[in-house]
Image (cartoon, grey):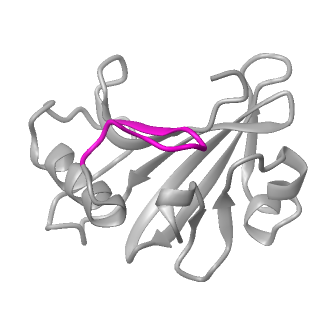
Amino acid sequence: MNWKEGVIATDAGEIIAHPKMSFEELRATPLGASATVKELSPGYPRIVIKPVLISGYECCASVGFDHGILDDMEIVVTDNTAERFSFVTGHASPRDGPEVRFLENWVYQEVGTKPPVGFTWGRICEVYDLIAGFAHVKFIYGVKR
């Protein structure tokens, strides 16, 4: 896995996201084929990947596409192996809470700086969703960004 290049893979080596990845490419993988697809609006499907190991942490991923091309991805840690904190999708966590600090440090370990951070492929923009109120790592690949 090389987050600096925008490539996110499971510990088993299955690629979940890379710049310019297509919807069909992810769906053709065993992981993508077994995932749930949600289309929130026409042309903007999301592939929801059930728990997989990423850097040793059990995570769920939500991968969004804009007319068939990777647009964004969110990773939520779903177990308590990470510093003994419990991370659950939708679980409210304070903006400066332990979950946020853990995720900021995880991004730092992967790319050498805390978010937000930009790259030629896009950016890692946040580890906390103010609207939903939970901690996650968000990658913006952006078809139009």
Q: Quadrant of the C terminus?
A: top right
* In the image: residue 31, left or right of residue 86: right
Image location of residue 56, percent across then percent down:
38, 77
* In the image: residue 93, left or right of residue 76: left
Identified at 82% across, 67% down, the residue is 29
Front in this rendered view, residue 23 or 125: 125
Image location of residue 47, percent across then percent down:
71, 44
Identified at 14% across, 48% down, the residue is 101
Identified at 19% across, 44% down, the residue is 100
Front in this rendered view, residue 39 or 19: 19
State which region is magenta: 114-126
Q: How many marks?
A: 0
Image location of residue 43, percent across then percent down:
85, 22
Q: Is residue 135 above or below residue 57?
A: above
Q: Is residue 78 above or below residue 52?
A: above
Image location of residue 125, percent across then percent down:
39, 34
Determine the image quadrant of residue 105: bottom left
Residue placed furthest toward the front:
120
Q: Is residue 27 above or below residue 58?
A: above
Front in this rendered view, residue 136 or 4: 4
Identified at 26% across, 57% down, the residue is 108
Q: Is residue 86 above or below residue 45?
A: below
Residue 117 in magenta stretch:
yes
Residue 74 in magenta stretch:
no
* In the image: residue 13, left or right of residue 21: left
Front in this rendered view, residue 16 or 59: 16
